[in-house]
Structure formats: structure tokens, C-alpha cells
Amino acid sequence: MKTIENFDFKGKKALIRVDFNVPLNEQFEITDTTRIDAAIPTIRKVLKDGGAVILMSHLGRPKEGPEEKFSLQHLTGYLSEQLGVIVQFADDCIGNQAREKASALKAGEVLLLENLRFYKEESVGDESFAKKLASLGDIYVNDAFGTAHRAHASIAVIAKFFPDNKMFGYIMGNELTNIDKILKNAPRPFTAIIGGAKVSGKIEIINNLLDKVDNLLIGGGMMFTFIKAIGGETGSSLVEKELLEVAKNILDKAKEMEVDLYIPEDTVIAKNFSNDAERKVCDVFNIPDGWMGLDIGEDTAKAYADIIMDSKTILWNGPMGVFEFSHFEAGTKAVAEAIGEATQKGAFSLIGGGDSVAAINKYKLKDRISYISTGGGAMLEYIEGKELPGVKAIGY
Ligand code: AMP
């Protein structure tokens, strides 16, 4: 894998595609700096070598042209503090100002370009836009795993202008190395826990995992589509009717492939979708009319925790219930804690997807997990076996 690790950036200008898509509040303050923090080691490496850094990123989904609330200018203060240098800013990612500032940049200096998505050319993968960006630096570094599954100009197209000078940053390198640990020769037993709201976004990952895992634990809103598919009464729980057949096929395929696929036995049901709704525990196949399942029950949580504790490789994507509501978070919390404990006992655990990562942070278990992926969609696509445009462009 071609990474920045063994490259000397002395005297070079590194054009780094980062994922600085951070949330901003009404005052344009950054409310979660995780994505910026993650990219700091890559930036520092270039500066330490005696190189200069040009950073490019998207922020949010601007519709047409520049918008104050999506300006990367709001990030310069925090970034300067973290790096210990005043980060310069070009208020257009291409054009004269960007060119002049990039060309005047000296070793040890950092220039941040304005939001790439202020140009629709970014998202459509426009080649001449990519070429203009490419002209700003000597070396292209991709460290934006969160967008590696997008065929955008700064991700997939730009690399061709650096045939011999393109490489992965530390985030990309770490992501690929760690996800490969579960895709290639994972120590057994290998358990995948898949939850979240809907089956629709998870079909391909489940299908691709069936020939890799020993145990597949299903939870979250998506469990009710499986339960309905095998004749259960699901009340007003979330069910994707058009996917009943697909769910049935997954169950059949799991049996054929001798994967132990687990569906919850009990569920915490509620009268409506609210934390304070009337609630009770019931058998997952007999949810009364007018009630909806919002979490896995205690027996299921315990059974899942036992399986997790006996595993050597663990992949978790998607909460077991509506963990944002304190009355329906117990299942997600139990699973998260079991993963933390299994990891302390020596298992390798990989967690990805915005909501599972949020859960791990909520329960303060971050330090008990082997690797937390920064890219939900990109991680899922990589595990699904798809070639990511950002990975292909560099070559791996
Ligand atoms: P996803 O983005 O598909 O991983 O879904 C995550 C979301 O699923 C979280 O916001 C959870 O609140 C939600 N979720 C989990 N379990 C349920 C459930 N039983 N019913 C409705 N939503 C759920």
C-alpha cells in the first residue's frame, strides 16, 4: 500500500484531500471535531518533513454555489490551534487566489481551500475541475476515507494527474488495514452484529458477510422485517414489506452456509415512538396491535452478549434499538459493553457507522474497541466487496 509513511515531503507541496465535513452550530462553531482531529497526524507528518500542506475538503451539501453555513473558513481557528501554525485560507478552491496562495506557500505552512462542493463539478467528477485542483500541489494525498466511496473530482479523478506522486494518508492506511483484518483470515469465531433502522441499507453487507462469519446477530428496527418474514406478529413495528422475500432468502442462505443467524427472542415494545411512551417486554413473535418494538429485550441482550464474549473477531454496525431514547437503550448498551469486554480479553473489534460510533462514545467505551471506522458508508461498501473509487484511484 502506498502511504505517506515512507515518503519524504521535504520541499514538496502536498495537496491533501481530507474529510472535514464536521457539524457546525448556528454560531458556526464546530460541535464535533473528531474528523479534523483524525487528520492531524497526516498533516503533521508533511510539516515535520519540511513540506507545505494544501488542504481540500467538502462540508455539508451546498445546493448552488457558496453559502456561509458551509464555509470551511469556520475551521481555520481550530485547525490553527491544533497545528500550532496560522492556517491560511483561500476563499475559492480554484482560481487566481488559490493559485497565488498555493504558489507562495513555504515549508511548514498550511493553506485550507474553500469548500469543494461550492462547485457542482466536484460531485460530478469533472476532469477539468480536477486538473485545476491538481495544479496546486506536487503530491496528492487522499486521507478522506469517509468519502472514498464517491467518484468525485477530488477523490477519484484528480489522482490521474499525479501518476507517480499519489498516496494514502494515515487515516486511509489505517482504515484499509483494519477492515482487511476482518475480511481476510479473521480469527474465529467471527461474529457480526448488524442493527439499525432498516434492512434496505444492509442487504448487501449481510450477503457479503455470510461466507465470512460464524455468527450473525440481528437487532434494531430491521429485525422486524425478518420476524414478519417468518410469520411473526410485529404490531406497528418498522417493517419493510417489499423486503420480506429478501429477508427470507437471507435466512435460507445463512442456513445453507451454516452461519448461525440469530433473531431476537424478546423485545421492548412501546405504544408510540417516544421515550416516555408506555412500555413493556414481550415475545418478539407476538407483538400486540398498536405496539412497536423499540429495543431488543433483556434475554436477547444477554444471549447476544454471551456470543460476543466468546468471539475472537467482532464487527458491529447499527444500534440494537432506539438508543437515543434512554428507555430503549439497554440492548445497544449491553452489546456495546460486551464488545468492549471481549476486546479486553483479546478479540479484535471493528465498529463503523455513525450510530454505532455515537453509541460507543455515549457509553464511553472508545478505548475498549480495537478500531472505530471513520467512514460509515465507505466502510459498508468496502465490506460489501465493492471497489471504492478513492482506493482504486491510488491503487491498492
Ligand atoms: P441506521 O442508520 O440504519 O444504522 O439506523 C440507525 C437508527 O436506527 C438509529 O437512529 C436508531 O434510533 C434506529 N432504530 C434502531 N432500532 C429501531 C427500532 N426498533 N425502531 C425504529 N428505529 C430504530
Image (cartoon, rainbow, N blue to C red):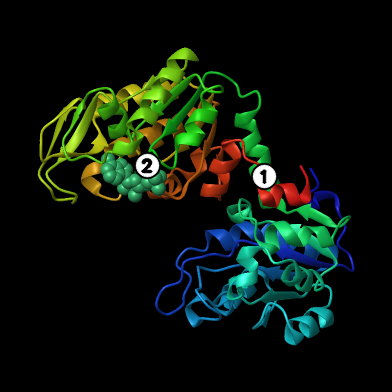
Q: Which mark is residue 196?
A: 2
**In-front residue for pair 378/309:** 378
Which residue lies at the image location 51% right of the left edge and 48% below the top edge? 376
Q: Is residue 40 above or below residue 113?
A: above
110, 102: nearer the viewer: 102
Query: Could you say whether the residue bearing mark 2 is in a helix, strand or loop?
Result: loop
Query: CB of residue at label 2: within 8 Å of ligand 1?
Result: yes
> Dividing the picture into quarters, in which one does residue 370 lie?
top right
Tell which quarter ligand 1 is in.
top left
Q: Identify the residue under disc 1.
A: 174
Total numbered labels placed on residues in the image? 2
For residue 112, side relative to residue 332 (left or right): right
- Give the image quarter of residue 340: top left
* Residue 359 visible in image: no
Residue 118 seen in this snapshot: yes
Image location of residue 207, percent across then percent down: 50, 29
Disc 2 residue type? Gly
Residue 95 shown left or right of residue 135 in the figure? left
- Residue at x 87% of width, y 67% of height: 12
Measuring from the top left, give residue 201's x and y in whole percent: 44, 42
Q: Secondary structure at mark 1?
A: helix
